[in-house]
Image (cartoon, helix red, strand yellow):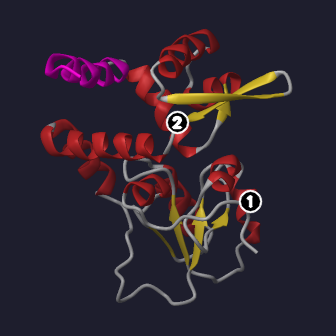
Amino acid sequence: MERVRFYECLARIGKLVESPERIRIVDALCQAERSVEALSESTGLPVRTVSHHLQKLKRDSFVVSRKDGRFVIYSVAGKDIVTFIEHMKLLSESIFPEMAAYLDQLRKNRRIPHRETTPANALLIDVRPEEEYLEAHIPGAVSVPFENFEENMNIIPEGTPVIAYCRDRFCDIADRAVAVLKQNGYRAWRIEDSVSARVAGAEPVTKGKEN
């Protein structure tokens, strides 16, 4: 391969992620495989927009698809895509002051447990949608989706300390879950650990339901 062609291939990656909507779609697929309709619901983008971007992403091997009855299910082409998106987030935080400021704002009222003081009997909960939990989750975590959270948290024994996590450190779902837990008398914290960060760092994740 000529050196010019080499850089042209690298530039194709830049073109794939030049659209905020396209990055949002890939980020959603890093959490779990989805149909066009499910992606539209997850991202808030119109079905037609999602479909358009998926075709470009599939053409350049960022995503793959499979048939499931009358639906086409899309997923990222491999863990390297998850790692790439996670590194994009790290880079944006490093070079863009507004991204660092956004994260600082999120952390202002964020309760993160100190390892020395974390209760040994704390229950780790995953507050992402169940399909994302089933795709992959932190070992030992229990699925308590934030949707209808006050009903879902009935599975948490009264008085049990709780540690929550969600999609990444920029995600505030776990923060909102902690606030609800505290309002209901629980001791609760959140961690910034996530499935995508673990995949990028080659750390273990678990698929399916915990025993």
Amino acid of disc 2: Ala
Q: Position of residue 114 (x, y in %)?
A: 34, 80
Q: Quadrant of residue 134?
A: bottom right
Q: Position of residue 201 (x, y in %)?
A: 36, 60
Residue furthest right as drawn: 69
Span of residues in magenta: 1-17
Q: Quadrant of residue 158?
A: bottom right
Give yes or no for residue 4 being in the magenta stretch. yes
Q: Secondary structure at mark 2?
A: loop
Give yes or no for residue 33 being in the magenta stretch. no
Q: Examine the rendered structure and indicate whether residue 106 appears above or below residue 92.
A: below
Q: Position of residue 131 (x, y in %)?
A: 69, 47
Task: Look at the magenta stretch and give its main secondary structure.
Answer: helix
Q: Secondary structure at mark 1?
A: helix
In the rendered image, the quadrant that contains the N terminus is top left
Mark 1, Cα crowd under 10 Å, few <14 / some 14-19 / many 20+, is: some
208 vs 141, nearest the viewer: 208
Amino acid of disc 1: Asn
Indicate which disc residue 152 carries.
1
Q: Is residue 33 left or right of residue 165?
A: right
Q: Is residue 149 left or right of residue 102?
A: right
Q: Nearer the viewer, mark 1 or mark 2?
A: 2
Q: Position of residue 138 (x, y in %)?
A: 54, 66
Disc nearer the start of the sequence (1/2): 2
Indicate which disc residue 77 carries.
2
Indicate which disc residue 208 carries.
none
Query: Exactly how many numbered labels are in the figure?
Result: 2
Tell me which residue sits at (41%, 28%) in the image: 23
